[in-house]
Image: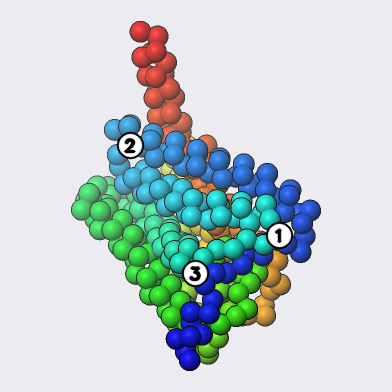
Amino acid sequence: MKRQNQSSVVEFILLGFSNFPELQEQLLGVFLAVYLVTLMGNAIIIVIIALEQTLHVPMYLFLQNLSVVDMSFSAVIMPEMLVVLTREKTSISFVSCFAQMYFILFFGGTECFLLGTMAYDRFVAICHPLSYPMIMNKRVFMKLVMFSWVSGIMVATVQTTWVFSFPFCGPNEINHLFCETPPVLELACADTFLFEIYAFTGTILIVMVPFVLILLSYIRILFAILRMPSATGRQKAFSTCASHLTSVTLFYGTASMTYLQPKSGYSPETKKLMSLAYTSLTPLLNPLIYSLRNSEMKKALMKLWRRRVDSHTF
């Protein structure tokens, strides 16, 4: 009987904002623009850092990895979401829903750890500048990057496999824009209490622990900046850290509210908006925050642009 129930749902229906059809039409244009700018902005950062040798240092290589994650994150969610916004109801197969949830968790988990390692990198650079080349050497950098990606894979594998091990015997309508864990779990025809305890604990470890460590790092960084004798140095350090902290607060804040909330905590529409904040706005804002506020990135972009113009001239 259990096996029969599990096979009874072969596809899910994504409802999107079907209760507000006029809102869907407006959001379609907005999120299409968000998607294109996200892809372009992150692609530019990846290419600039790859081509400019002076940027082959941990700070920018971490940023390059973050851009790869953000671009992939957006590519997993946005195309399907744009389709959902064009219709009242959009079907997604069981397998496609599994794959989308897996990659959302994979790239989301990886970003959590990457942002944490970037905070550690800034902490060492500002608080221990003389020891920085030894502490953050190539070997340590590679270990931190590999840890971030492997941790994302582990989180996604355990959680997605567990969610889809539950029987789904109907209804099959997901009141959301994509296959995220909380709304899919509501459709499971089984007791999910044990999984919810695991998910809550996992979210604390994956989201809140790195966030707290980042905040502690920035408290230390703040004191180090205030002790700097040069006003220019303080301003540059504040600018660099403010960029990272803005990104961190937006991502961790909305992600934690999405995954730590009780089932009845927010309305479905509020849950959708919170999910959009960390899955769509963060990948959009990261390249703008890091590139527009960073003089080295702007210099590298201008250098590559002049090189391109000169090559066409001659």
Per the rendering, the mark at residue 88 is 1
Q: Whole-Å distance between the Cαs marked 1 and 3?
A: 19 Å
Per the rendering, the mark at residue 94 is 3
- How packed mark 2 is, by other alpha carbons closer than 10 Å (few <14, some 14-19, many 20 or more), is some
Residue 13, located in which quarter of the rendered image?
Answer: bottom right
Residue 205, located in which quarter of the rendered image?
Answer: bottom left
- Please tell me which residue is depicted at 23% across the width and 50% down the height of the picture: 137
Label 1 close to label 2 by CB (< 8 Å): no
Viewer-closest of 141 and 221: 141
Q: Is residue 42 left or right of residue 172?
A: left
Tag 2: amino acid: Ala
Mark positioned earlier in the residue sequence (1 or 2): 2
Image x and y of residue 298, in percent = 46, 31
Image x and y of residue 72, in percent = 44, 51
With respect to residue 96, does 55 lie above or below?
Answer: above
Q: Whole-Å distance between the Cαs marked 2 and 3?
A: 38 Å
Tag 1: amino acid: Glu
- Please tell me which residue is depicted at 56% across the width and 55% down the height of the picture: 80
Q: Is mark 2 on a helix, strand or loop?
A: helix
Per the rendering, the mark at residue 172 is none
Q: Whole-Å distance between the Cαs marked 1 and 2?
A: 42 Å
Image x and y of residue 261, in percent = 60, 76
